[in-house]
Amino acid sequence: MPFLYTRGAMKFEKNIGSFDRKMRLVAIGVIVFLHISGQLPPAFGDLFLYVAAIFLVTSILGWDPFYLLFKMDTTKEPDKEL
């Protein structure tokens, strides 16, 4: 179930794992650095800042609506083979 409605508030099932969150935060840092240093063209700079904002919000929430479309879930650790 992708989300639940409970007493006036929505609760989302987390579908972003810790490694995925860390990679998004690294991507945010790189995008912001490139934008501030002027390395991105003006047209793409704003676009990449919007992507960084989406990464930030989804990282904080631990839930990504695009993962629902593709039925992805990175919260589960893969089974380790011995």
Image (cartoon, rainbow, N blue to C red):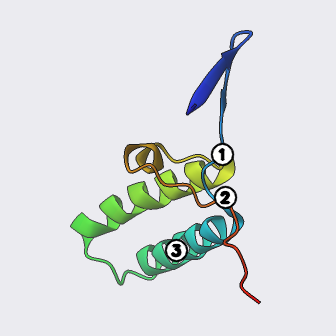
Residue 34 spot, x, y in % from top left? 44, 80
The answer to whether the residue labelled 3 contacts the one labelled 2, judged by CB atoms less than 8 Å apart, is: no
Residue 41 spot, x, y in % from top left? 25, 76
Q: Disc 2 or 1, which lies upstream in sequence?
A: 1
Label 2 to label 1, Cα distance in Å?
7 Å
Q: Secondary structure at mark 3?
A: helix
The answer to whether the residue labelled 2 contacts the one labelled 1, judged by CB atoms less than 8 Å apart, is: yes
From this view, report whether residue 33 is shown above or below residue 47: below
Residue 15 spot, x, y in % from top left? 60, 50
Taking the view exactly as shown, the residue that stands out farthest to the front is: 82
The answer to whether the residue labelled 3 contacts the one labelled 1, judged by CB atoms less than 8 Å apart, is: no
Name the residue beneath numbered marker 3.
27
Which disc is residue 75 wearing?
2
Q: Nearer the viewer, residue 70 or 54?
A: 70
Q: Disc 3 or 1, which lies upstream in sequence?
A: 1
Question: In which quadrant of the rendered view does residue 68 lie?
Answer: top left
**Left or right placement of residue 48 versus residue 17 in this view:** left
Residue 66 spot, x, y in % from top left? 41, 48
Under mark 3, the amino acid is Ala
Q: Residue at x 51, y 79 (%)?
A: 30
Name the residue beneath numbered marker 1.
14
Disc number lying in front (3 or 1): 1
Label 3 to label 2, Cα distance in Å?
19 Å
Label 3 to label 1, Cα distance in Å?
20 Å
Q: Residue at x 58, y 31 (%)?
A: 1
Under mark 2, the amino acid is Thr
Q: Residue at x 52, y 48 (%)?
A: 64
* Residue neighbourhood size for the residue with mark 2, other residues' Cα within 10 Å, grouped as few (<14), some (14–19), many (≥20): some
Disc number lying in front (3 or 2): 2
In the rendered image, the quadrant that contains the C terminus is bottom right
